[in-house]
Each structure stands twice: as structure tokens, then as C-alpha cells.
Image (cartoon, rainbow, N blue to C red):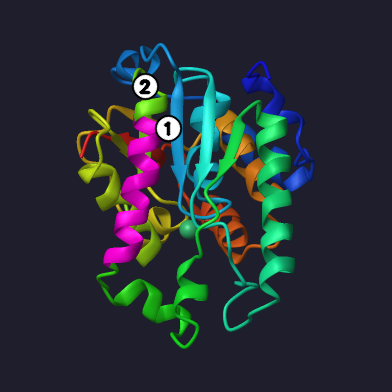
Amino acid sequence: MEPSNSALLKLAPVTTAEVADRAALHTPRLRAATTRVLRRAPEGTIILSAHPDDAALSLAGTIAAGLLAVPLTIVTVFDRTDFAGPGQRGGLDTVSAIRAQEDETFCAAAGVHLERLGMNDACVRHPNLAIAALFERPMLEPAITAELLEHLNELADRFPNAQLLAPAGVGGHMDHTLLAEAARASRWRRPMFYADQPYALRLGIAPIDPVLTIRHAPCALQAKLTAAAAYSSQPAATDLVRLLYRAAPGTPIEWVTPT
Ligand SMILES: [Zn+2]
């Protein structure tokens, strides 16, 4: 499939007057420092997504702005899930299928290839843990780390000249932090890390030494709202929209760092 960054805007367009009015208030401003580093990879960009929605919610503006080397591939890692909202668990196959469909819809519209690794997410691995505990408790899971390393090294061998983008682990969700650590420990050379959204916005985290920053501006806002609409089953998508409405123009809403 030929990547088409502009296609993202065709996905479930956000047309409410409220959004249009708000977007018009913001000065288009997009700072992309040293994006050549990210654009240079001859085999494109591999974006690791802990769950179906993380890459899209965190990088939709960057993708829509064409700031990454193409072709783009999102690799969704922990896509076996029964998480149907805080305190709610659904059927594993049913919820996984709904979320896979959301991921496919976003990727098809954004011109992004999609791969799924089929690993169980933390909700499935730890069915008795409350959702809050998934963010609080660093947990060693050597078998999961070993499986992640195997997958990431296989990707590194398959795409030796691609750029890897992994979640930074902002917010502390155990699946995100396991993935960030595995990316650092893998055979990928110079992996880069993106701010996990909506967590970074929720926590008011500011970027440190970013190689790329997307600020709150109409084009980025539209791309992110459109991405959020694609993942309508997810509270994180709703939360992101709420946080974007509250954010001041110019606020960094996406960024990528080398550490
Ligand atoms: Zn996630």
C-alpha cells in the first residue's frame, strides 16, 4: 500500500463546529527539529504500539505531517486483550477483534502497514490486578521480556535499515515500560522513543531534548481528533480528546526523543 499521510484526515472527519472554531484559534505551528534523522531511514519507520491505539493516539499528528521515513509500519504488540474500559472485562476474542478492527481502520486510512504480535496484554496476564495497579507496580516478567526481545530482534533483522520508534513508557503502564526496556535491550541501533499519549498530556510532562515536537495547532489537532475517533471503544481516546480541548495553543502534544 502506498503511504498517504493526507489520507488520515479522510478518516471519520471531525466536523463539529466546536472543533472547527477551536482549531481556527490556533496558529499553525509545527516545529520539527532534526527530523532528517527520522526521515533518513531507507526502509522506513517501524512504530511499536503497546496496545491497539497507542501509536495512533501518540503520533497521529507526526504521521499526518509526513515527518517520518516511509513506509510506515505499526507493530501492535499486546493485542490480545479483554480490556473494555475501567473495571470492565469483556470476552477475550470479542474485545481483541473490536480493537483489531479499530487499528485496521486507522492504519488503512493513514496509509500505514499494520502487524500484530498477538501477545497477551497486562489485563489478561494479571486478571486479578486492578487497572490502577497496572500503572503502579513495576513487575519483572522475564518470560514476557524474552518474548519481546525475540520479536524485536526479528524485526531488526528483517528491517536493518529502518528507524524504530518505541513508546517511552510515560505514565508507567507496565506493558509500555516492558516494551520501552525491550527496545533499548534489543539489536535495534538508535531506537527513538515517543511520548505516550494521553498519559504525557495528563501528567503535564514536557519534552526533554526532543528530535521532533508537534505543538497544539489546527493540523495536528485535527489529525489527533480523527485518530481518537477511530478508537472509540477506548477510554484513552476520550481522555485524549478532553485533554486536547484543555491544552493551550502551542503546547507540545507529540514528541520523539533519543532516550
Ligand atoms: Zn497502551
Question: Residue under circle 2?
Answer: 32
Crowd class of label 2 (few under 14; some 14 to 19; many from 20; radius 10 Å) = some
* Above or below, 155 relative to 34: below
Which quadrant holds the N terminus? top right
Q: Residue at x 42, y 61 (%)?
A: 202
Question: Residue under circle 1?
Answer: 214
Which quadrant holds the C terminus? top left
Residue 11: x and y, percent? 75, 36
Crowd class of label 1 (few under 14; some 14 to 19; many from 20; radius 10 Å) = many
Q: Say which of 236 and 202 sits in front.
A: 236
Left or right, 177 with reference to 15: left
Question: Looking at the rendering, which quadrant does residue 200 occupy?
Answer: bottom left
Residue 139: x and y, percent? 27, 73
Q: Residue at x 53, y 37 (%)?
A: 74
**Residue type pointed to by label 2:** Ala
Is 149 covered by the magenta stretch?
A: yes
Badges 1 and 2: C-beta atoms under 8 Å apart?
Answer: yes
Find the distance from the CA under tag 1 to the CA under tag 2. 7 Å
**Residue type pointed to by label 1:** Ile
Q: Main secondary structure of the magenta part?
A: helix
Secondary structure at numbered mark 2 = loop
Q: Say which of 80 and 238 sits in front.
A: 80
Residue 59: x and y, percent? 49, 38
Residue 59's tag is none
Give the residues in magenta: 142-156
